[in-house]
Image: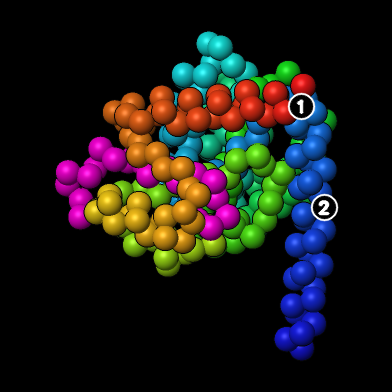
Amino acid sequence: MKKKEILVLEELLGSNKKIASEIRKRLEEKGILTINLLSSPGAGKTTLLEKIAEKLKPDYKMAVIEGDIETERDAERIRAKGIPAWQIITGGACHLEAKMVGKLFPEIPTDLDFLFIENVGNLVCPASYDLGENIRCVLLSVPEGDDKPKKYPKAFTTSDCLIISKSDLLPVLPFNLEHAQKEALDVNPQLKIFTTSALEDSGIADLIEFFISSLKKLRQKNA
């Protein structure tokens, strides 16, 4: 029975990988950089996206795909910033899958610069599913504690960057920034790390510069 369960899981992930590869190819052909955001619930993904939208909007076009078990609240917040947003309601599933993203293709504008995917709040399930992104970012908020990289390693080993969020709370919470960074780099030495506070607008500019630089490299590669 265990062998059958493993084979079924491999088949499902293989199917997801194939769809994700096609999504990535099609978006890259349009010159769109796709960024998948993972985190625990409440780590600040939507608030971060609102701040990014404010800064990118004058010069770049972006859109957001929101994933949640229920409600369109996060998509409504993004739309209020004048940014196109689509809500995927999973109805209980703990992650997004590539086929869910693929169904939205007819609605996604072809002249975007950035497509952000805010995954379902969870540090476990989403780490196993490629959504066709170019960059995967995992958020770790200061209130969560500094020990998460080694407790939930796959979310960090499969990511390209770590965004430590809510850094404005560092003075009042027992979060060891150096320890969190070291643990993250222990599990994934290639991680780019950004320490941010959307509330204080701290570290956001560096993160956005990383995204813009990555967009330019993508377009140069496909020129």
Viewer-nearest residue: 192 or 207: 192
Distance CA(mark 2)–CA(mark 1): 21 Å
Q: Which residue is most to the left?
A: 172
Helix, strand or loop status at disc 2? helix
Residue under the point 48% across and 48% down: 191
Viewer-nearest residue: 28 or 82: 28
Residue under the point 79% across and 76% down: 7
Q: Is residue 90 magenta?
A: no
**Residue 94 is at least partly visible in this image:** no
Label 2 amino acid? Lys
Label 1 amino acid? Asn
Q: Quadrant of residue 32?
A: top right
Q: Which residue is mark 1?
A: 222
Q: Report x, y in % for residue 37.
A: 54, 43
Residue under the point 31% across and 49% down: 142
Q: Which residue is mark 2?
A: 18
Report the number of discs.
2
For the C terminus, which image quadrant? top right
Tag 1 or tag 2, which sits nearer the N-term? 2
* Foreground: disc 2 or disc 1: 1
Helix, strand or loop status at disc 1? loop
Q: Magenta part of the protein: which range? A: 156-174
Left or right of residue 27: residue 210: left
- The vertical placement of 190 against 110, above or below, is below
